[in-house]
Image (cartoon, rainbow, N blue to C red):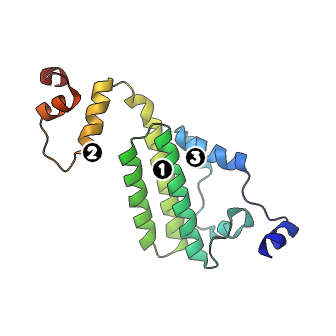
Amino acid sequence: AELFQRREEEICHVEYDHEYKFYDNITEGRIEEVQKVLADPKNITMYEAPEYGKLSKDFLRNMRYHFVVSAALITRLCVEKGLERELAYTLSDLYIGKMDIAKTAEQIIVLHNEMLMDYTHKMAELPKQKIYSIQIVKAIDYILKQRNTKLTVQDIAEELNINRSYLS
């Protein structure tokens, strides 16, 4: 019945091209473009617009659900475009945790804007990080995976099958 009513009232979600461009601007590190579309924390009514989708009848819970969906999509798209996986997922966890304790719609919007800009800045930095050799990239990845283990240069060199002094 609700599906029929939505069709009759011509209620549609955000156009795919518009949504894709939004996520593409983030994953390509287009800081200025993302800044242009940040939500105004004082305008919480935008989440009442039908194109955003109603995931809950409770307004604040609806915002929280949208936040989680956004964080999940952005995280996966950024990983796909080269952001280090563990970093991307840790950011997602941190922002969702902060959102979970936010008390107001305004706080959630501010946090969402902060998350969007954080991912966008990290993606903008990626090309600068591509100057490392494959051995260094593998070493960084190994170190991040073993961050709770005491490592030496020798341990890392052995893991990568390269000479310790070369790695140094």
Q: Mark 2 points at which residue?
A: 145
The span from disc 1 to disc 3 (Cα, nearest Å) is 16 Å
Indicate the secondary structure of the residue bearing disc 3: helix
Front tag of 2 and 3: 2
Q: Which mark is residue 30?
A: none
Front tag of 2 and 1: 2
- Amino acid type at mark 1: Thr
Q: Which residue is drawn at 72% across and 67% down?
A: 49
Q: Is residue 35 left or right of residue 17?
A: left
Residue density around tag 2, few if under 14, some if 14–19, many if 20 or more, within 10 Å: few
Q: Of the two numbered discs 2 and 1 on the same chain, state the one appearing first in sequence.
A: 1
Q: Nearer the viewer, residue 57 or 49?
A: 57
Q: Can you tell which quarter of the image residue 168 is in?
A: top left
Q: Residue at x 71, y 45 (%)?
A: 17
Q: Position of residue 53 (x, y in %)?
A: 68, 66
Q: Mark 3 points at which residue?
A: 34
Which corner quadrant holds the N terminus?
Answer: bottom right
> Where 23 falls versus 162 (above or below)?
below
Q: Can you tell which quarter of the image residue 156 is in?
A: top left
Front tag of 1 and 3: 1
Q: Name the residue under label 1.
A: 75
Q: Nearer the viewer, residue 77 or 31?
A: 77
> Where 106 falls versus 81 (above or below)?
below
Q: In this view, does 151 lie to the left or right of 25?
A: left
Residue density around tag 1, few if under 14, some if 14–19, many if 20 or more, within 10 Å: many
Q: Residue at x 78, y 74 (%)?
A: 2
Q: Of the two numbered discs 2 and 3 on the same chain, state the one appearing first in sequence.
A: 3
